[in-house]
Amino acid sequence: MSAKAEQTLVICGHGMVAQRLLEKLVAQPHRPFTRIVVFNGEASPAYNRIQLSALLAGDANEDSLQLQQPDWYQHNSITVHQGDPVTAIDREERTVTTASGRTQHYTSLVLATGSRSASLGLEGEGLEGVMGFRDLKDTRQLIHT
Ligand SMILES: Cc1cc2nc3c(=O)[nH]c(=O)nc-3n(C[C@H](O)[C@H](O)[C@H](O)COP(=O)(O)OP(=O)(O)OC[C@H]3O[C@@H](n4cnc5c(N)ncnc54)[C@H](O)[C@@H]3O)c2cc1C
């Protein structure tokens, strides 16, 4: 089957919403897609973002935040590209391009990119030690500050 003839679902983002969608899709008796490809802006597989507060407080560890074991994706034939955000979408060609230069064709595309820490535009926001609290990278940095 050619790459274009496959029913390929591409998901942009691998947060809690994308992970819930993946779990619903693989639980269906007849999977609607022959291929599922996920591009994740973060370097870590999907984790429970809500629990970052507990991680920061020392009440949880990183392993306990993981939403699935690493082999779950392989077992369910889901390709996940970690740390490779989508940088462009070509709707006519039905392709996405990523920061690393990959181009992936899709038949269906889901954007599950969540949100980012907002900046309030206040004086002092650029000072050293002032930072957002949104992802695992921020949390690790806060723990080690
Ligand atoms: C510390 C903290 C505590 C929270 N506590 C609660 C709570 O108690 N209750 C509650 O309801 N909610 C809480 N939230 C909010 C909750 O975590 C979010 O609502 C939820 O994570 C949203 O899920 P999502 O999948 O839509 O987006 P996200 O979890 O933000 O995931 C989106 C993913 O997409 C990736 N991405 C972005 N752009 C691209 C791109 N171009 N290409 C590829 N990937 C991309 C991002 O890197 C990210 O990994 C909390 C959030 C934080 C940070």
Image (cartoon, rainbow, N blue to C red):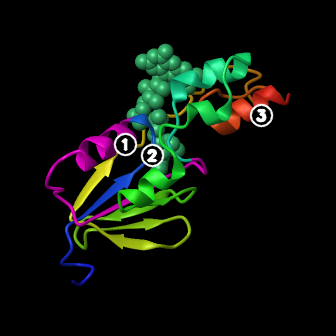
Front residue of this view, candidates 3 and 62: 62
Residue 46 in the magenta stretch? The answer is no
Tag 1: amino acid:
Ala
- Quadrant where the N terminus sits is bottom left
Snapshot quadrant of residue 55? top right
Residue 70's disc number? none
- Provide the residue designation for mark 2: 14
- Ligand 1 under 8 Å from disc 1 Cβ: yes
- Provide the residue designation for mark 1: 18
- Provide the residue designation for mark 3: 141
Indicate left or right for 30 with 52 as reference.
Answer: left
Cβ–Cβ under 8 Å for marks 2 and 1: yes
3D distance between C-alphas at marks 2 and 1:
5 Å
First of labels 1, 3 by sequence position = 1
Front residue of this view, candidates 60 and 12: 60
Q: Residue at 54% x, 56% y: name it.
A: 82
Indicate left or right for 123 with 36 as reference.
Answer: right
- Ligand 1 under 8 Å from disc 2 Cβ: yes
Snapshot quadrant of residue 34? bottom left
Q: Residue at 53% x, 51% y: name it.
A: 70
Tag 2: amino acid:
His
Q: Which residues are magenta?
A: 17-44
Is 70 situated above or below 121? below
